[in-house]
Amino acid sequence: MTDARAAARITAGLFLAHALGSAGAIAIATVAAIAGAELSGRTALAGLPGAAMQIGGAAAALLVGWLTERLGRRDGLALAAAIGAAGMIATVLAAVQGTFPWILIGLALAGSASAAVKFARFTAAEVQPRARRGRAVAIVVMGGTVGSVLGPMLVAPSGAWSAAAGWGELAGPFLASLLAFAGAAVTFAIFLRPEPRELAARLEAAGGQPSDLSPARPLRALLRDPGVVTAVVTLVLAQGVMVMVMGITSLHMHDHQHGLSAISAVFSGHTLGMFAFSLVSGWAADRFGRIRVLSVGGALLAIACLLAPLSPGFVPLFVALFLLGYGWNLCYVAGSALLSDHLSTAERSATQGATDLALGAVSALASLAGGVVFAASGFAVMSGAGAVLSVALLVVVARHAVRRPAFRAG
């Protein structure tokens, strides 16, 4: 098998694993706020289950970086996804028994699977030359298109099945997520052959960028690299805005008498925006530059945050959540490609793992803060905070564009 065919096989496996993992994560996100409010008995704690998963994912991001460095990309990612599936066993049992603390523990462990499928985009980038990294990231992220459809579609029927079985409506979506994470683990183990790290080393030896072969820089030097700083800060801000608004929308709709089917449809639209147009985002990032794409993404996030609280109706929320998803996608694809551009092979696992740790941490904070602000001040104030953060993202991007206008990839 040629290296080009091997890279294509690996990318296909990463696409499939991301599809399965995102389906599981989206099914959880669709009902997490409802589970938090119902099982805890307090609306202010609605964001806690989502925060638990985000915290688990943040902690697991460093674990994934360590595992992929020590065991290789294939075994490290497969093991991390398997840990997430094991966590969902506890979550299902807790949902059946109505035990709120164990829901949090199970979802914290489930974050490991989420961290693995997120890290997969960096694995796709490293087996491709620099000029194709944006599209490689986009192909893997596009796997979430399948998840964006499959995840919400699983919620209502699995909930009905588990309710009929006497387990309660919430256990079904968690069980569906367990199966999805297990499938992702198996996919990593089967498709990531040959070992992606070895393939990347051959690619670099055959003519990769000189910077790819540079030794790892200390943290202080990385923090002085404008490309690294801009990539990490924009990824963190975009993630925080998206999670804060998305995470509490299900409860907002539930309070306005929308059923699970309507809530799932809005989440389908949101996740469609998050993933379906990833190839367009990747092509644009490679063709027009990472910074221009980040600017459009930040603007869409701000618009979505301003539209979301205008009406509790189905159509306005569908449109706002779709724009929120696509704005995030543009920032996620372009930011990930920008980060890969500025890292050597020796720096990737640790720095990318630390970046995903930051994304997980801000996601947990955003999920928790969303529930608290929503309970105290309402949906409009929470969305307004998201708009402010989106403007901050645009300021960071503008500063980088002024400093390095001639660097097309950045």
Image (spheres, helix red, strand yellow):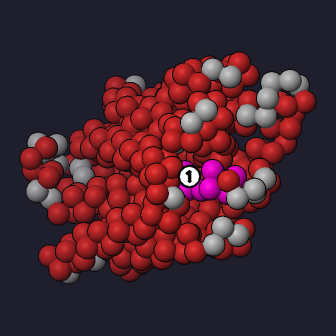
Instruction: Identify whether 45 is placed above or below 98.
Output: below
Closest to the observer: 272 or 118?
Answer: 272
The image quarter in which residue 57 lies: top left
In the rendered structure, the answer to whether residue 136 lies left or right of residue 174 reads left
**Magenta stretch holds residue 250:** yes
Closest to the observer: 214 or 218?
Answer: 218
Residue at the image point whose x is 56% and y is 52% from the top: 248
Quadrant (top left/top right/bottom left/bottom right) for the N terminus: top right
Residue at the image point whose x is 48% and y is 69% from the top: 305
Magenta region: 242-254
**Magenta stretch holds residue 115:** no
| Magenta: main secondary structure | helix
Instruction: Identify whether 103 is placed above or below 283.
Output: above
Residue beneath label 1, please? 248
Instruction: Identify whether 186 is placed above or below 294.
Output: above
Image coords of residue 334 (percent x, y): 39, 66
In the rendered structure, the answer to whether residue 127 lies left or right of residue 257 reads left
Residue 88 showing in the rendered view: no
Quadrant (top left/top right/bottom left/bottom right) for the C terminus: bottom left
Q: Residues within 10 Å of mark 1 (few under 14, many from 20)?
A: many
Report the residue that reaches farthest toward the right. Answer: 164
Residue 211 showing in the rendered view: yes
The image quarter in which residue 406 lies: bottom left
The image quarter in which residue 217 lies: top left
